Amino acid sequence: MKEMDCEKELGDSAPGHNKGHFVLVHGALHGAWCWYKIVDLLEKDGHMVTAIDLTSAGRHPATADSVKSFEEYNQPLMDFLAHQEKSIEQGARIVLVGHSMGGVSLSYASEAFPHLIAVAVYVCALMFRGGESLDKEREYMLPDKEIIEKLEFNKPNGSILPTSFTMPKNLMKNYFYSETESVDATLSSLLIRPFPAMGIYNMDLKTTEERYGLVPRVYIKTSRDKLFPPARQEEIIARSPPEVIHVLESDHSPFFCMAEKLHQLFVQIAIEYVK
């Protein structure tokens, strides 16, 4: 396992390298829209790119309160990969990228479709050890207590457990976009949607070394992250060491504040792993 300083290691991107298919998975509260800069840059290079809206996120018609499990929340990604499995182009061509909570989606996808995924890229994301149930690692999915106390929970009809939650827009700037231009923070404030709380309470996946363990993992650490602090990222990395660690001097949303460097990094990763 090696750690790379992206300020020093990033070279030019490689337009025309078109082997990989980038599949981008957003984190909590966000949608496919958060990748708009990355999609634009990759497509200009000639790459195939798909940004997924998970259930109740982005333009998906479902509401967060209607989602009963992480499996239901994650179904659009699994449906997409199942379709790819049936397509003419076979082989591990997919560069699967997950941001923040999107790392959980990568665990499900890696267990179900390891033969399709050339590399799983975790962008300041939850990354779990293979060979055990995600239920045992739920504590790593929850933010710090001081952040939880600031979330807005929906508990319809006096229910004990919330069915969804969101973060007040005035706090999003501090935790998600502390180094992001105000125009992108404003865009986000208009597009974020609640996250289905049952997606955390109800999940049923046991990863195996024979499937999840086959997929190479690359971690991109955000060193100025206030939502998912570097110390917590390092703890997750230590529990489940990836093949390579890259470091960006970024807040929690490098797809906004460091889009060019993140794009170049994705291209370099594809060159290395997509054969």
Image: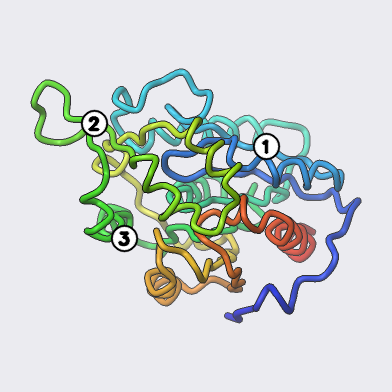
69 left or right, relative to 184: left
Query: Residue 245 in the image: x percent, y percent?
Result: 58, 73
The residues tagged by marks 2 and 3 sit, at their Cα atoms, a distance apart of: 20 Å
**Quarter occupied by residue 84:** top right
Q: Provide the secondary structure element on which disc 2 rests.
A: loop
Query: Residue 19 in the image: x percent, y percent?
Result: 82, 50
The residues tagged by marks 2 and 1 sit, at their Cα atoms, a distance apart of: 29 Å
- Residue 212 visible? The answer is no
**Quarter occupied by residue 239:** bottom left
Q: Provide the secondary structure element on which disc 3 rests.
A: helix
Query: Residue 198 in the image: x percent, y percent?
Result: 27, 36
Q: Quadrant of the C terminus?
A: bottom right
> Mark 2–mark 3 contact, CB under 8 Å?
no
In this rendered view, identify the residue nearer to me: 228 or 168: 168
Which badge, 1 or 3, comes first in the chain's sequence?
1
- Residue 263 visible? The answer is yes
Callout 3: 10 Å neighbours few (<14), some, many (20+)? some
Q: Amino acid at mark 3?
A: Tyr
Q: Which mark, by number, is residue 16?
A: none
Q: Amino acid at mark 2?
A: Thr
The residues tagged by marks 1 and 3 sit, at their Cα atoms, a distance apart of: 28 Å
63 left or right, relative to 13: left
Q: Kindly identify which residue carries mark 3.
A: 140
Residue occupying the point 47% across, 58% down: 125
Q: Which mark, by number, is residue 163?
A: 2
Q: Outermost residue, top direction?
A: 61
Q: Which mark, by number, is residue 50?
A: 1
> Mark 2–mark 1 contact, CB under 8 Å?
no
Mark 2 or 1, which is nearer the eye?
2
Residue occupying the point 87% across, 59% down: 14
Q: Provide the secondary structure element on which disc 1 rests.
A: strand
